[in-house]
Image (cartoon, grey):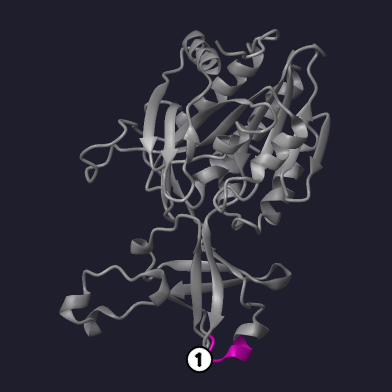
Amino acid sequence: MSLIERLQDYCLTPAMSGFEDEMIKKLSRDLKDLVDELRVDILGNVIATVRGSNPKAPALMVFAHTDSLGMIVKKIEENGYLRIERVGGVPERILAASNVLLQAKGGKKVEGVIGFVSHHLTPPDEKYRVKPIGECYVDIGATSIKEVLDAGVDIGTPVVYRPSFVRLLNDRVAATSIDDRGGCALLVELAKHLKQKRPAITVHIVGSVQEEFNLRGAMVAAQSIKPLAAISIDLVAASDTPDIAEGNGVRVGAGPVLGTYTFHGRGTLNGLIPHPKLVNVVDKCAKDSKITLQRHATIGLLTDASYVQLVGEGVACVDLALPTRYTHSGVESCSLNDLKDLGKLLVSIVENFPESENFQRG
């Protein structure tokens, strides 16, 4: 399976945070013959290990999250409509009239749509108002609670954007859950390379869970692995469209991105200032591989590396990202060339990772 085929397969797989089983199965399937050891922990983290040729070399964890954001059914109305709550940073302004898919019981998939007042019947003062999540409802065509339950839908059923994947001009795609199925696809590409060329260091390739919910799934994997260093593969919001006057300067098609600073103050008070020695490793590998590397410092963004860095006595962490437009919507867009270059950078980092570095500060 090629990179683009795997990306499409993963993007079309519904796997909301806390309900990642289909992605767990697919990622395990694609990694099991490429690594020395594969296991899935209780939370659902897929942990694949490639043992290094140097037993004294440090262990590196490379991870991307398997889950997507979405919604969850919180109430079933008598007339069959479903009330929902957000799981993760779902933008309310795009929800009305969105196509959705429900991950129903027994692996069933139920189609639905988030309702809205028909344009012809909308009062003038309501035409430009964003409907908050508390006013949103999902219509699956049911007319009673019994019909909803018979369809395998109940309180607690996950709801995701209806999966889609389309090719755009200039080797770009628009798809559901590029965040972070793009990173998951690169994990497999990295494993394929290491199968052919065993690294000196031990590499733990991790598909983490519940990133969009509480960002702490990867923490559990790191507690088990105890890596010296870790690289998060995720996306960063690009600010290169006409409706963003100012931003972080990140552009789609201009290469992978090194995160130099992230901070999310709403409730989490966490972020990542990457380990400077690890930043030097990334910079050197990008330069030696002739890969154009963008940099970003972004407020309001967070990855699970923010928590992995706090495991044990501390883990040297860095964020590497795929520049992506329209993030957290159902039609995120990225460049396949950026994705391929990010994969090349990952390979270079693993191949050239310092075997005697202890990442001590000061």
Residue 315, image x and y in percent?
A: 63, 26
Q: Residue furthest left?
A: 124
Figure check: 111 above or below 147: above
The image quarter in which residue 39 lies: top right
On screen, residue 122 versus residue 324, left or right, reads left
Q: Amino acid at mark 1?
A: Asn
Figure check: 340 above or below 144: above
Could you tell me if residue 30 is visible in this image?
no
Residue 301, image x and y in percent?
A: 43, 41
Could you tell me if residue 234 is visible in this image?
yes
The image quarter in which residue 196 lies: top right
The residue beneath circle 1 is: 79
Residue 137, image x and y in percent?
A: 45, 77
Q: Which residues are magenta?
A: 142-147
Quadrant for the N terminus, please.
Answer: top right
Residue at 55% x, 33% y: name it.
233
Residue at 59% x, 42% y: name it.
5
